[in-house]
Image (cartoon, coloured by chain):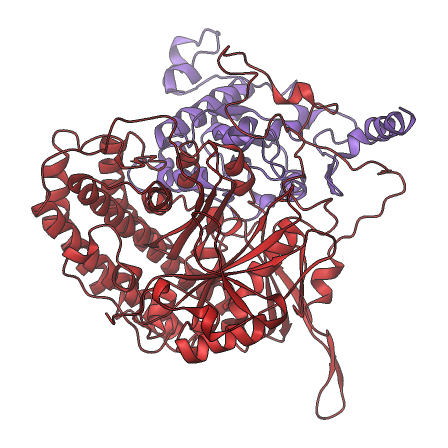
Chain colours: A purple, B red
Amino acid sequence: MDVKEINSPGYDIPDDLENQVAITTLDKIYNWGRSASVWPLMFALACCGIEYICAQASRFDLSRFGMEVTRPSPRQSDLMLVSGTVTKKMMPTIVRLYNQMPEPKYVIAMGACASGGGPFKEGYNVVSGIDRYIPVDVYIPGCPPTPQALLNGLIKLQEKISKQSLKTVRWYQKGEDRASIPVPILGPDLIDPRKITLITNSQVEEKSS
Amino acid sequence: MTTSIAVETLDLSSFFPGIVSHDTRPGYSGWVVDKLHLFEFVLKLRDEYGYDLLSSVTGVDYYPDDKMEVVYHSFKTTGGPVLNYKVQVPRQDPVEVPSLVSIFPGVELQEREIWDLFGIVFTGHPDLRRILMWEGFSGHPLRKDWKEAYFEEESKPFKSRWPEGKIIHAENNNKFNDNISYPSGFDPEKWVPEGEAALYGALAKYEYTSSDGIKSDNIVVNLGPQHPSTHGVFRVTVVLDGENIVNLKPVMGYLHRNHEKIGERNTFLQNMPYTDRLDYLSSLSNNFGYALAVEKLMNIAIPERADYIRVIMAELTRISNHCMALGALFNDLGTFFTPLIYLLEERELILDIFEAVTGSRMMCNYFRFGGVARDLPEGTYEKIKGLVFERLPRKIDEIDRFMSENEIIRSRAIGQGILTPEEAIRHSATGPLLRASGIPYDIRRADPYSVYERFDFDIAVGQHGDIYDRYLVRLIEMRQSVRIIQQAIKGLPAGEIQTGKPQYQVRVPAGESYGRVESPKGELGFYVISTGKPSPWRYHVRAPSFINLTPYGHMCKGQKIADIVAILGSIDIVLGEVDR
């Protein structure tokens, strides 16, 4: 967002106050600050993580977007870049990390595997896309996406952030915390606590048939 | 290089009458050993015939035949071809084979993997737990009668999609609309998770009494799977006495992507892009190993130009891999990101060449059986030439100048994480890890493949087996790779790049083969069994990162907790290859 945009809220500014006072909306200034300082979680799963490191390095340089500050702790980060194949064994950890991130938080599914299972979809230990468990804001296709594609995805996320409004965002609503997600359990296969009744019913059906 | 006895001339059946017999199945080689005499055989093989490196152990399921097999691949560290032997057991539970951990600790993790994926019990193994899947998972996935949740057909291309070209979502065939299936009789209401009691149970005692009679506790610390210095999703569980490491267990499987199960459904050529994703920092070396294994079975020759291009690409891969490995090691030693970013600059230049030649930066998918996919495009020859004659030698010297004498690097690396040569061999370590311990074992020399015999290069060897020597070995290897590419690019012949016409479907005769290359991480082997069908019966990867982790606990014991990270960095693992 450039200066002109911030300064055009749709109100007339008196002539004698021009160049001294800027009028803008709270949403615009709030989103401008947030979208220009997204701190990603230092978290790489697989091959896509290497392209993410390349995007961090001098050639592509993420600091142009205010995203060079990767945090090793989820408590300090705004963005989780799920970069690589999500396995069933890793799934409880990812959900726990997501729950630990403070609001506002965003998730990017980087690459084919995180978006839908990718080339390993048929594998017995592979989750068919991270969005089966946690909400995803931006999907980036590719196997792996090039750093350019990743940058495009991050710019899309910035666009999404700048369209949000303080009135409607999830984290300022009253009521219970709506972002936390039940942690899956490692049983004979991965068990989603939200699907327990479905599993029980199908097992009963199987027995009776 | 010493000249060694070729395997075929060594008639083991006469040395071990009644115990060993020749494997006579068509296309197979090696020996079948009686299960009861395995110890005796292995000891004699090691002590009298010099096969001291038990490189790879894997299982094969011959369902519906009543037979399971454990296959051992053994080498001499002085060089020479493979000697493989097998133990055959009936397929009734419990399937039992004696464990070799007491002789070769290097098989510890591999035997756990076979137990996990095949359900073969290794009697006498000190810590037989699941390794890639979790405790409590139902079934042993690599058994041929075990079906995954998205199972459609035994082998590709699936009839539903070809030749009609229909698209079916695998989810729609599953009653949960997801990649899950539960054994019959499973009741989620009554079931209790097994958790990690087995892991913590394996980590020795937590309580001890010191010499003055005071009772004290050790503490258990978990690093990972989400930890910035574990190079991915690796997890280490350590028992600490103060700051000193008492015991350490690597925990893996967080990136287990089922390469081997998927590989057995794929056709031979369909596996090529999957090998890229094993060690995703050096995809072209992986292509190389797999191509060699299948070419051995098909028995085809490779045109000279293709061989040269292969060597150039594999050595460029080695340089780019070591850039990443050293950068990450410096990170772990405390130089926060600056040297890594210097090294990534060089890596980017090499990736540019890969992108021009193969079409992709990382997942190159470039090798084909009998050659390579396409010739070098215009301008690439000059680019490679400029890189290896001008830029890289100067940049490697620069890193040497900046880092080798650095006080912090030296004080954190010298004398830490020592692995003696004897222990390195016993633990089946290969690659820079073994060479830094003083064993000049490099497959490019010990068992030459492709056209490596034509080039003049040195093998980097360390003396102390500590972190610093591993760093130096990698630095020297980068220089030697530059030297090899300089020779190869000068002598690059003109001509064909592929034997015969390019094909989607290759005909592979029945038999077994083991193709191995010196990948940047160590010995990368592919064990392929073909039954003459379009897809392999068994497709196993001998992953150097995975096996190099076997001595990790041994190296860490007695060190301080901060050294865990530095020692792991010096092994240079990639999780895609550790977990496969």
Q: Residue at x 42, y 41 (%)?
A: B275
How far across and down, in percent of the image, does residue A203 sit? 85, 30
Q: Residue at x 17, y 60 (%)?
A: B397
Quick check: A201 above or below B416? Answer: above
Q: Find the residue positioned furthest to the right.
A: A208
Quick check: A201 above or below B551? Answer: above
- Asked if residue B223 shows in the view, the reply is no
Number of marks present in the image shown: 0
How far across and down, in percent of the image, does residue B312 sit? 20, 46
In this view, the residue in front, A58 or B264, is B264
Q: Quadrant of the N terminus of chain A?
A: top left
Q: Residue at x 48, y 70 (%)?
A: B427
Q: Find the residue positioned furthest to the bottom.
A: B212
How far across and down, in percent of the image, does residue B35 sit? 61, 66
Q: Quadrant of residue A141?
A: top left
Q: Quadrant of residue A134?
A: top right
Quick check: A137 above or below B450? Answer: above
Q: Residue at x 10, y 49 (%)?
A: B390
In this view, the residue in front, B575 or B112, is B112
Please state if B245 lies on the left or on the right of B563 as rendered.
right
Q: Quadrant of the C terminus of chain A?
A: top right
In this view, the residue in front, A149 or A144, is A144
Q: Quadrant of residue A116?
A: top right
- Asked if residue A87 shows in the view, the reply is yes
How far across and down, in percent of the image, does residue B392 sit? 17, 51
